Image: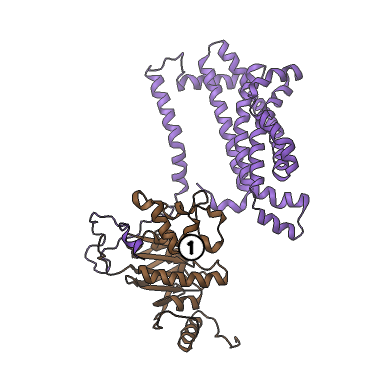
Amino acid sequence: MTQLIDSKRKHHAHESRPAFDGGVTDSEGLRRPIVTEKRQRSRRATVSLRVTVPLLLFALWWILTSTGVIAATTLSSPAATWDAFVNLLLHQNLLGDIGISAARAAAGLAIGASLGLVLGITTGLFRLGEELLDSSLQMLRTVPFPAVIFLFIIWYGIGETAKVALIALATLFPMYLTTSNGVRNVDRKVVEAARTFGLVGQRLVRKVIIPLAMPSIMTGLRYSTGVSIIALVFAETIAANQGIGYLVSQASSLLQTPNLVVCIIVYALLGIAADLAVRTLEKYTMPWRRHLAVR
Amino acid sequence: MMTKTSTHAAVVRSVTKTFGPRDVLRDVEVTIDPGEFVALLGASGSGKTTLLRILLGLESVTDGDVFVPESLTTVFQEPRLVDSMRVWQNVVIGLSGDEASRQSAVSALREVGLEAHADAWPGTLSGGEAQRVALARALVRQPDLLLLDEPFAALDALTRLRMQSLVADLCARHRPGVLLVTHDVEEAVLLADRVLVLKDGRISLDVPIDIARPRRVGGHHFDELRDEFLRELGVAERGHVPE
């Protein structure tokens, strides 16, 4: 026994500790536990914490542009940006452009994410599928999607198809990777048990494997959603006569910084709206995990 | 080495814990002496694990006061080893300097009979082996208070018997204050110096076990004690048909 006790110092701290419990004798030499229990924050506190950093950034933007530290031609002030926004809204059909852009992103995402989901389930589930498809997909995954757009223009012309196809291509891979990984990590023992009780084939996939892989799938969807906005920017800037990207190229050729800033903010808002949508979806597709939200 | 100045290994003073509308613990008083082995019996949902988690600092108290020694360690119901670290690294997890050496890990593993597995991955161990690693991890810190949360519950019957005598043996040698949370009445009588029963959020029974060690299951006095605890827990005695 002694080797344990003698070979090492006790785990005590050597410095004398402050009296935790003044005057009480039976707790001498003891301390109160250091409570690591998670504190529940009120909803209001959570919301205010979430908006703190964006508000600070906004204030910084305001101060830097209005004091002239940053020139108006470099970055327009919030006031000038607001004026540009109102002008675009009233005279240039900004809402229509936003709608067109959002529809493109959504269509591309729907196609790309569905394909990624199917491919991910196939390779995650079947050895044959994995051996047949995975290496090709991994190869294609590393091709930068902006490089493909000219090919798509040759194939599909400059219409909607090329844009949607590009967004679909860009969103396919994040979805594929996370789904495939998620399916592969589903608890084999649970699958085995479900099989034993007669749940096989498509029903097994639908009732057990996809729901259990859902956390990964949702991560993939969130990532794909972000990528869809990025791909949207590329697709629209290159060839479009409608949509936010069209406004961007117009503004940049006319050196209209305020309009550019409006477009960038619109893209950012589209991104946050998409993320919010996926988060809401997460809540409804995984009701069994609602109580264990990490944050 | 610091001398132990504390007169107790743990003090729980009129602790109340409320989850929502439910009082899980009501005015609970417990003191554990240095080197004393205390078993806390209770039906599932009786709040015994909550009390242990309060001592660990994993839960706060709603009311009352808790005091624990500087060095306290625990063995959970499951091993809770980190799969990405070797067995010996798991044993000295969170320590630093000399204390985190492979040598000290191996000597702790030797005490639980697993020094040959020092370099194994936790995933390759059996349930009983993994739990022994968890025990080594708790002992290598030479705790003044060792908290055991049904550490044998998930083990098969044979492994459980072996683990029980290993724990009895190790505790007799290192003499930490021990709080064993369990629902196994025989286990409590077999291992503890004193048995507490937690019922409706209160300590309803506090009985010293005066059977000489080493103990074994059975014998008149053993049966008497066991039946008393079972009655307190609302279970009919063996051989009797429940009404």
Asked if residue B59 shows in the view, the reply is no
Q: In this view, does A96 lie above or below B35?
A: above
Asked if residue B35 shows in the view, the reply is yes
Q: Tell me if A25 is positioned left or right of A203 in this view.
A: left
**Which colour represents chain A?**
purple
Query: Where residue A262 sits: x, y (%)?
Result: 54, 22
Instruction: Name the one closer to the observer, B46 or B96.
Output: B96
Task: State the scheme by which the image is colored.
Answer: by chain
- Looking at the rendered structure, the kind of residue marked 1 is Arg
Q: In this view, does A233 lie above or below B95?
A: above
Mark 1 belongs to chain = B
**Which colour represents chain B?**
brown
Q: Is residue A180 above or below residue A57?
A: below
Q: In which quarter of the image is the N terminus of chain A?
A: bottom left
Query: Where residue A242 sits: x, y (%)?
Result: 66, 19
Pointer 1: what residue?
Answer: B132
Name the residue located 69 percent from the left edge and 17 percent from the top edge: A150
Instruction: Name the one closer to the observer, A222 or B119.
Output: B119
Please tell me how crowded label 1 is: few (under 14), some (14-19), or many (20+) other residues with Cα within 10 Å.
many
Q: Tell me if A134 is positioned left or right of B89 in this view.
A: right
Q: Tell me if A190 is positioned left or right of B65 in this view.
A: right
